[in-house]
Amino acid sequence: AATIFRQQGFVILRNVLSVDSAREVLRACRGVHTAVASQDSFGRGNRGFGRYSFNNCTGSGQCLHLLPFVEHVVDNRYVLDVLDEIYQSTEAPETDASRQSLKDAEPPYYISRVSGDFCCGWTHTFQKLHSDMSNAQPLEGPPSPETGPDGSLILGWFGSRLLKTLPPIHDRFRPPAIVVNFAVQPLTRFNGPMRIIPWDEMKSHWKTRPPELWQELRDHPEWLASRIFPLRPGDALLRDVRVWHGGCPNLSGEARYLPSLEVASPEYHAFLNAITQEQEDEMGREDTGFWRALPAEYAARITDERARQRCSEFIANDPSLDANRRASDYSWLGKRIVRPQPPRVFPAAKLGAAEVALAELCASLGRLAEGASLVLQGPGADAGTGKFQEQLQALALGLFSKTWSLQGLETLESRCRSMAKDLQDVMVSQKQDARHAAGALMQELDKLITSVAAKYTVAAPCGMQGEPDLEDLVQGDAKRPRRDSNMSARLED
């Protein structure tokens, strides 16, 4: 895993959470979402419409006051083992004899945040590719020094703050920070998986900054078409924060959650602490204990000494601190639940109503084929079964085909209509297992949509001439996102 991470900038870890543990964290995520939805019923989001960061939603900017995050996201020895290897730790396995030396030693990294993000089930937009550390240049090396107004050299920026020393963020093989995103529900091509660009492909782009959406569609359509899926509940995506990544549309009708553990190298941790202390001193602020977001009771439950040591600065030892008084309180919300952002206009990939309905239908067929319930769960989830029946009926009647030119595809479209009717009969009679019929229909529908997309792509590639550019939703694996033309949809951000 560590070798793949160094080569690509990310790696997928399988089964780092048990099914029960993933379910507990999912319930906690939904608890926060329910509280957020009571304050933002329109889903305006704080990372774009329908998208939220947990750290912008919670009162402490962390999820450490929620026990499932502490027990399963923080106290996770499998993830800690991989992180140790990436940071080339030489620590011996934890034993009674080594506990004291472990406490006294500089750890290979510190836990810097326990958070994550979620995306509502009706989010039809792409998130722009971005780095979580935009000033870092891991491929080109440190930028050339600038000359400040007083003639001194400027070696970097932190927000609007001038840096007189080089920040420890430019070495590709020494990650200043790593994020571990945990899958707590099945991640599919339909419910907003992440697209991520490996180091080598980042290097192929002619700029140091990631492209805007329209540039990505024009220059790297395979990036826009890439997805990391499928991930099972309990899997994790471990990534260097500097690798370009972005969110994709969630057309499943159900919110997608990605809780996360964030860690920082010792040198970047020291750099951040120094910057933060300077800012606090300039503003004349006193230490109020705001950042101590881990209830002392929960900290005592952490079984892995490494995890306890590396998040020790967050422990709220004072009983009067909010973290202790509001432990497991989902209503402890922050002040940045909603952060309006100007929309990025991307008309070349705008979704049509029929395309949204087809994607939702395919997502429902996938759930049915896997034997999962059509009744969706969580805040803002669609009813599921009723909408599925309506969409299946529309396909059986040929209503979707009215928006397309199907010359040469009549036989395939007729087969999809016939199979839709067969599935309706199976579901009504309940004499057969609907999973096989749903899976067969999904495969044929994939073929039809792919064929339609191919016709439009030949007519005017990349969607820059205003044609109905049906972009592929694609599959990716742990080593390299790859193109998969199984599903097509026009998308915008």
Image (tube, rainbow, N blue to C red):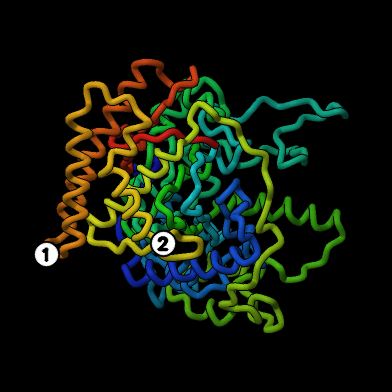
Question: How far from the left and from the top, in percent, is residue 285?
Answer: 83, 62
Cα distance between the residues tagged 1 and 2: 24 Å
Q: Dot 1: few (<14), some (14–19), or many (≥20) neighbours within 10 Å?
A: few
Of residues 374 and 36, the one drawn nearer to the viewer in this rendering:
374
Q: Residue at x 46, y 29 (%)?
A: 202
Classify 56 as above or below 357: below
Classify 330 as above or below 40: below
Question: How far from the left and from the top, in percent, is residue 41?
Answer: 61, 60
The amino acid beneath tag 1 is: Lys
Circle 2 SS class: loop
Question: How far from the left and from the top, in percent, is residue 407?
Answer: 26, 21
* Figure quadrant of residue 331: bottom right
Residue 81 seen from this side: no
Of residues 228 and 321, the one drawn nearer to the viewer in this rendering:
228
Question: How far from the left and from the top, in percent, is residue 209?
Answer: 57, 29
Circle 1 SS class: loop
Classify 326 as above or below 130: below
* Figure quadrant of residue 383: bottom left
Where's the C terminus, which quadrant? top right
Q: Which mark is residue 48?
A: none
Residue that badge 2 annotates = 383
Residue that badge 1 annotates = 431
The amino acid beneath tag 2 is: Ala
